[in-house]
Image (spheres, grey):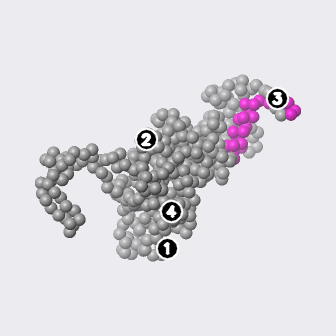
Amino acid sequence: MLSVHLSGSSVSALQMELFAPILAAYGSKSMISNDKLYAHLESCGALTREEITDRAPVGRSGEMHSLGRRKIRWYQQTLKKLGLIERVAGSRGVWRAATGITKDKELTPAPAGVSLVAFSTNLGVAIWGDCRTVFSSIDEPIHLCVTSPPYCLAQPRAYGNPTEANYVDFICKALEPIVKALVPGGSICLNVSNDIFVPGSPARSLYRERLVLVLHDRLGLHKMDELIWSNPSKAPGPIAWASKKRVQLNVAYEPVYWFTNEPHKVRSDNRRVLQPHTERHQKLIAAGGERRDAVFADGANRITPGAFGSKTEGKIPRNLIVSGHRCARQTPARKAASDAGLPVHGAAMPFAVADLLVRFLTEPGDLVVDPFGGIATTAEAAEEGGRRWLTTDLHHEYLFAGAHRFKQRAGFENELSL
């Protein structure tokens, strides 16, 4: 099981035994009195009647109080601080789910300095909070980080994004605690946008090039590759320069940068991601390989008789991933958000991208992290492959949706339900 120690004003899993049932009670009704809350906690087995009603001396005065009810009030105040519930004005002891949480189209960022367990399985934990706070607090060696940070778009998405001017610094600060915990030969993979343009110009921004250089100079990361994620369903664009001015071609791909801290110790192994041979290649192997002797590309490539005749376990993938941005793996999360009247994440990484990277760069049991987890695509790829995982996101609604991808996984617990 993943060990996470959260500091400061964060709330850890060990402190959370009443969190889910209390929040669930408020999420199921428009408003609820304390008496009804006590009855709910008793009926669901979270507390016994004796724990709620029995009184004990408290403090120097020895005044008698119900320790169970005091505990419940602590949770209420914590939930209030997190912006999840609110008092009903003019009604004593009556609370309700905060209007910004249940049926609102706005995203709810975690309060500053607060980290809260959202959901977990036997293999991993999802945390609602700022990634810098969370990853500065963990004491586990990290083997791989796969993430798609917010893009530096001119028109911010719902979750917000840094500007191009501060993007490099934003990424470095987010990755710094992860790099410190990275095992020798561990990897960091970043899916960033290729479609950032100089304002008012058809020329592409050089922010990607600056990012690569600064990650090397500032964090000591070495660029292993720039994989291409080809997205056949990517919307046409850039509209101004391709469709209107006609000076650009429509975009079709995004880069996925692969970095490591120690290239000679890199833990990748392409045997973990071999693909089936084509029928044509299988026939070639069965025939004993090539029968010709030929030279191509001015001597750069040579084919000799018998080449490609040896039986192998499969084909080594090329550094090109072809996948649309929508995939079936996202369906439970998207449906959960839609059913709850919450914003649906519109820019989630497809499972195929995360899955390839997780299998290629880690072994079962390794720790895979994602500081910008969204609806937990990287986490699901890690779970599927038997890797431990830790994912964070600043927005409650995305993690609420992402939790629905794990409902059938061993040890699933949903702490941050509506």
Residue depth check, mark 1 versus mark 4: number of the one nearer the observer: 4
Considering depth in this image, is 229 or 328 the residue closer to the camera?
229
Secondary structure category for the residue under label 1: loop
| Residue type beneath disc 1 | Pro
Q: Is residue 162 left or right of residue 231?
A: right
Crowd tier of the residue under label 3, counting other residues whose Cα lies within 10 Å: few below 14, some 14–19, many 20 or above:
few
Q: Is residue 407 above or below residue 227?
A: above
Mark earlier in primary sequence (4, 3): 3
Which residue carries the number 1 mark? 199
Which residue corresponds to the image point at 67% horizontal and 43% vertical from the top-left?
A: 79
Secondary structure category for the residue under label 2: loop
Mark earlier in primary sequence (2, 4): 4
Considering depth in this image, is 322 or 291 the residue closer to the camera?
291
Where residue 166 appears, x then y in whole percent?
56, 66
Res. 315 in view: yes
The Cα–Cα distance between marks 1 and 4, rounded to whole angstroms, is 24 Å
The Cα–Cα distance between marks 2 and 4, rounded to whole angstroms, is 28 Å
Mark earlier in primary sequence (1, 2): 1
Which residue carries the number 2 mark? 364
